[in-house]
Structures are given as structure tokens and as C-alpha cells.
């Protein structure tokens, strides 16, 4: 199975077009804003959402010029939400680069995020396609609900694994689902296929976020390019923690690390050791795999061979990646 | 001319429906968010944008059930932008009530604003009307551009009256224009009428903001329900200041008050006296009237008598109000 996902070369060129368009649009504004937005855009990101738009755009008739605006819009919505998230989390770095709120201030971050949301919806609104608008508006609303949910449950041990699943569905999975539905619709896919890739995207997104949360505990910071234990430090209770609690006798220790704003590096490292001493990492990876299997199940309804194969590759990448 | 605008009684009932729907939608979320959003919604506001949707909805066939979602969505976008504005301005009160960032914190304000933006677009997207989405997306984008513009020109005396006009067009006028176009479209108005009320709305919005900026200097705080001189305190250069500069010898004093974060109440009061000693207030009111006249000019293209008459009343209200 692939540790690194490699796009078919045709799509590589097309993803480059998306990238160029993202840069062009963000650079339209002068000054701090363009600089701030570009910094966030360039700080990496795998462009998974635009890739999903392109791949699902192969389900029927592939026309990259039709797909670019939606691929750009969805990455802008994602970027805007990351920028606001960084303010809400008080994060100083993202993927090793300083955040907008750290480099400039929270005000620049708020207005840059608002601007990118605005640009995304303006791009989409020009396509005169109510379906695309509806899908994106629902996903953007879900993002903000997830954001609120995250704030409410932060440093709060009194939550269930269902709270966690609802949160990641809103914060990650529904935007993945939107990307897939949009590509499929733009290719002129059948209703059953649109519904199926939507389901694929949602389950893929769940798996992606769960695996991301695993990497925050069991990953290698040199490979990840970022420190581990960030979720613990930020007081987020992720699936590995919920599952570790079912086995460990050190519940009180984990609770204290999550609830305490001032947990030290040593305490976080010890919490990670406690979690790793259980089967939580393995079990969480299994749950992520379970979601990928549901995603694969949905793919059976897709006729187009190349699209189905590539969407499977993405699923395998998500649960086998190192970063 | 009317000092207080009074809606026709039919519209009063319908505005009540809009109000109930706003409350209902905002209350769908539990906890802090609903409380925070409701506080801002209830902190007053004249509901001018929903009123404009209803009034322009009379241009052809008036159907309140069709108008309510757009009236609600536009007030939510406006409210969201006020909430983010309060964070950007570091404002503690709005219309005498504490802001969300003052009562809770900036994080609650950011996420409440994001949520209301999301809800607004979701409501609109359900109407399956690409024109409405386009108008609102453009207005929301303009809002964020105006927000950025305001941040960039804040405490900066090196700007022109054109900077000011561009900023208020983005921050106020284009949302007024959107409200009017949306109502007209929903009533099934002719293309020429839609274009004309759009122009009416834009000019009305310009007049409204200019007059608001006059009141911040020449208003009576007991009637306004808020202190005066807030723009000066916040380092905003508004039209009365630009015009005062053309006459006064005290340019350096005004510049210092605007550029200095720590201007005292006494310094702000002196700046107000300097401005009032010129013809700036009178001249600014004239400019506001000029925009209202342009708005009235556009109304000539509207056939429907009642709509035209009420839209004129609104124009007169805007430049004759005390608050």
C-alpha cells in the first residue's frame, strides 16, 4: 500500500492550474492581506480537497476548466477556516510556519479569513449553480458549528466519543464530502454516483481526521514537520484518548493534562506514554480503517474505472501516511 | 420631513415576522452562542436592510413568505459583520450594550460571526436562486474588503476622501444595494427596476453612512444612546474631518487626535469643537443629501406608487434622523 499518494500525471498538471489560480486570486489584494493569506496557503497542505474535486470530476465527463473554480473555492473555505481556527486555538505555528495571528495579529487573521470566505462564495456564485452553492454553504456552516463545538468541548473531559465524532464530521468530513459531490456534479455524474461519492468523501474525511489525531500522538515529529501532542496541549480529547481511558488506570492523570492550561512538555510526554501503553493507537487506526472501508463500499457504485481506482488510492494513502 | 420613519402597518406586521424568524434561527443553537448572537441582534439596529427587502418587494407582486428568508439572511450577514467589526475595533459597547468580545471574549465573537455568516448563506442557498446568491456573495465580499480597508486606513491621516467613500461603499452601501435588488427580484420586478433600486440602495447606503458619521460628531449622546466622538477615538477619518481640514488652521491638532491611540476625552471634545467651528457638518449633510437625491433619481424608474413613496420616506428619514 502507498505511503505517499501520487496523482496521475494528467491531474498533476491540472492541480498546478488550481494552485496557480489560488495564488493569483489571493494575490489580487495588495499588502498585508495577500501576504498573510499566501503565507497560510503556502504553508503546505496537501490540497486534498481540490484533488478530490478533480478526481470526482473524472466520474463522467472530465473538464478541468469547469472544475477549477470549485476546487479553488473549497480550498479557500478550508484556508479561511484554518486561519480562524488558529486564532481560536491561539496557535503560533501551523506546519512549522508562524500563523497569521502570530506574525501580525488576531485582527489581520480575522479579516483575512473573512475575506477568503467572501472570495470563495463569490467565485462559486458566478457559476450560477444552486446545487454547488447549497453544498458549499452547508459545509461552511458545518465548519462553523464544528468550530463552536470544539471551543465548547475544549479542556472538557465530560464528553463522549460521539461528541468527538460529531465534531470531526462538522470540521472535516462534510467539507471532504462537499468536494466530492461538487466534482461529481460538475462532471455530469448520475444522481446515485453523486450521492455515493458524497458518502465516500464523508467517510474518507472521518478517517483522515481520526488518523491525523493518531499522528498527533504516535507520529514522528521529524516526519510530521510539527511537534506531537499538540491536541493534548490544546486540551482536545481525541479518539486515542477516549480509547486509552477504557484501559488505563491513569484516567486522573490524562484528565489533568487535558484540563490544565499549563501542562508541561514532560506531563504531555508522560500522557503520550500512558496512551501508547494501551491498545488505543492500534484500535484508533482500526476505526479509521473502518471509515475507509465504508468509503470504499460507496465507491462500488461508481462506474468510471480510473476515478474509482484513484479514489481508492486516496483512501489507502489516508490510513497509511506518515504525515 | 419625517424625523422618525414609520412603516405602513402591513409592513410592520411583516417586519415582526422577520424579527421572529431572526430570533428563532439564532436561538436554534444552544448556550453561549445563541446568547451572544441574540444580545447583538437585540442591541437594537433599525432593521433597515430587512425593511428595504420588504419595501422593494412591493415593486411588483408582494409575497412576504418569499421575502422573509432573504430579509433574515441579510440581517444575519450584517450582524455577523458588526460582531467581527467589534473585535477589529476592540469595541466594548455597541449602542450602549456590551459587545460579545467584551462580555465573553474575542473567540466567542469570531465563532459567532462565522456561524451567522454560515447560517445566512445556508438560508439563501435553499432558495435555489443563483441571482440572490450572487448579490449576497458580492455584498459579503465587499464587507470584508471594507473591513480590511478600514483596518489599513485606521489612525492614518494620509488618505483621501475617495478612500473614505470607497470604504463606506464596501462597508455599508453595497449591502443596502443588495437588500434592494433582492426584494425587487423576489417581487418579479423588471430588469430596469431591479437595476434602479440597486442604484437607489447604493446611494441611500452612502447617505446613511455619511449621516451616521456626522451624528458621531454633531449628535446628542442622550438621543443617540451612545457617546459621540467614537470614530475620532477609534482613529477613523470620516467626511466631516476631511471637510474641516479644508478650512481649519488646526490640522496638526486633528491629526494628532486621530493618530494617537491615547487621545483623552478632552482632546476629542476639543477636536469636535474644531470641526464644528467650520462648515464641515453642514457641508457633510449636504453631501449626504446629494446621495439621497441620486437615490430619488433612481426611484423615478419605479412604477409602483406605494413602493416608490415608502422608499422616498426612507431616504428622507436617513438624512433627517437624530439617531
Image (cartoon, coloured by chain):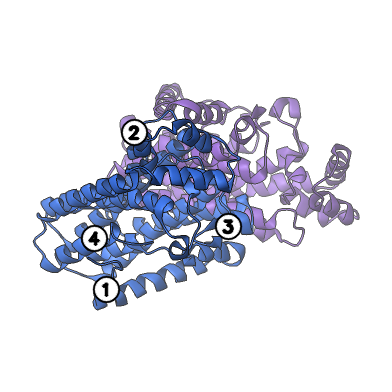
Chain colours: A blue, B purple
Residue drawn at the location 32% of the way across and 63% of the way down: A50
Q: Nearer the viewer, mark 1 or mark 2?
A: 2
Q: Position of residue B6 (x, y in %)?
A: 53, 25
Q: Position of residue B316 (x, y in %)?
A: 59, 36
Q: Estimate the spatial distance between the alpha carbons at disc 4 and disc 1, rounded to whole Å.
A: 18 Å
Q: Is residue A67 visible?
A: yes
Which residue bears the numbered disc 3? A100
Q: Estimate the spatial distance between the alpha carbons at disc 3 and disc 4, rounded to whole Å.
A: 33 Å
Which residue bears the numbered disc 4? A316
Q: Estimate the spatial distance between the alpha carbons at disc 1 and disc 2, rounded to whole Å.
A: 44 Å
Identify the secondary structure beneath mark 2.
loop
Q: Nearer the viewer, mark 4 or mark 2?
A: 2
Q: Position of residue B174 (x, y in %)?
A: 51, 50
Residue drawn at the location 36% of the way across and 31% of the way down: A160
Q: Are marks 1 and 3 in contact (CB under 8 Å)?
A: no
Give left or right: position of B151 versus B275. Answer: left
Q: Kindly indicate whether the residues beneath marks 2 and 3 are on one polypeptide chain.
A: yes
**Of the image marks 4 and 2, the number of the one nearer the N terminus:** 2
Q: From this viewpoint, which residue is outermost toward the right? A: B249
Label 3 environment density (alpha carbons within 10 Å; few <14, some 14–19, many ≥20):
many
What mark, if any, has residue A246 been given in the picture? 2
Q: Of residues B56 and A202, which is closer to you in this image? A: A202
Up the image or down, A133 lies above or below B266; here it is below
Which chain is mark 2 on?
Answer: A
Which chain is mark 4 on?
Answer: A
Label 2 environment density (alpha carbons within 10 Å; few <14, some 14–19, many ≥20):
few
Which chain is mark 3 on?
Answer: A
Which residue bears the numbered disc 1? A11
Query: Quadrant location of the N terminus of chain B?
Result: top right
Amino acid at each position: 500500500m502507498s505511503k505517499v499518494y501520487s496523482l496521475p500525471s494528467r491531474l498533476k498538471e491540472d492541480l498546478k492550474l488550481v494552485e496557480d489560480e489560488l495564488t493569483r486570486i489571493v494575490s489580487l489584494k495588495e499588502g498585508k492581506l495577500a501576504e498573510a493569506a499566501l503565507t497560510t496557503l503556502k504553508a503546505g497542505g496537501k490540497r486534498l480537497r481540490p484533488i478530490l474535486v478533480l478526481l470526482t470530476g473524472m466520474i463522467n465527463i472530465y473538464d478541468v476548466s469547469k472544475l477549477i473554480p470549485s476546487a479553488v473555492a473549497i480550498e479557500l473555505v478550508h484556508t479561511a477556516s484554518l486561519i480562524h481556527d488558529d486564532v481560536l486555538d491561539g496557535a503560533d505555528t501551523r506546519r512549522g510556519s508562524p500563523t497569521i495571528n502570530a506574525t501580525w495579529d488576531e485582527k489581520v487573521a480575522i479579516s483575512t479569513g473573512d475575506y477568503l470566505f467572501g472570495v470563495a462564495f463569490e467565485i462559486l456564485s458566478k457559476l450560477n449553480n444552486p446545487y454547488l452553492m447549497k453544498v458549499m454553504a452547508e459545509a461552511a456552516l458545518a465548519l462553523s458549528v464544528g468550530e463552536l463545538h470544539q471551543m465548547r468541548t475544549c479542556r472538557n473531559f465530560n464528553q463522549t466519543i460521539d461528541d468527538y465524532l460529531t465534531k470531526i464530521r462538522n470540521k472535516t468530513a462534510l467539507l471532504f464530502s462537499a468536494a466530492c459531490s461538487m466534482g461529481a456534479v460538475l462532471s455530469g455524474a448520475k444522481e446515485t454516483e453523486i450521492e455515493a461519492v458524497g458518502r465516500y468523501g464523508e467517510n474518507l474525511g472521518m478517517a483522515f481526521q481520526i488518523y491525523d489525531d493518531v499522528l498527533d500522538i504516535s507520529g514522528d515529529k521529524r516526519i510530521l514537520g510539527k511537534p506531537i501532542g499538540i491536541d493534548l496541549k490544546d486540551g482536545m480529547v481525541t479518539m486515542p484518548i477516549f480509547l486509552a481511558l477504557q484501559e488505563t488506570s491513569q484516567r486522573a492523570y490524562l484528565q489533568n493534562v487535558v484540563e490544565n492550561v499549563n501542562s508541561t512538555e514532560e506531563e504531555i510526554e508522560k500522557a503520550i506514554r500512558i496512551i501508547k501503553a494501551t491498545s488505543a493507537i492500534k484500535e484508533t487506526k482500526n476505526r479509521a480503517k473502518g471509515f475507509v472501508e465504508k468509503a470504499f463500499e460507496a465507491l462500488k457504485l461508481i462506474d468510471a474505472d480510473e476515478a474509482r481506482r484513484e479514489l481508492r488510492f486516496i483512501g489507502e494513502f489516508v490510513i497509511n501516511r506518515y504525515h
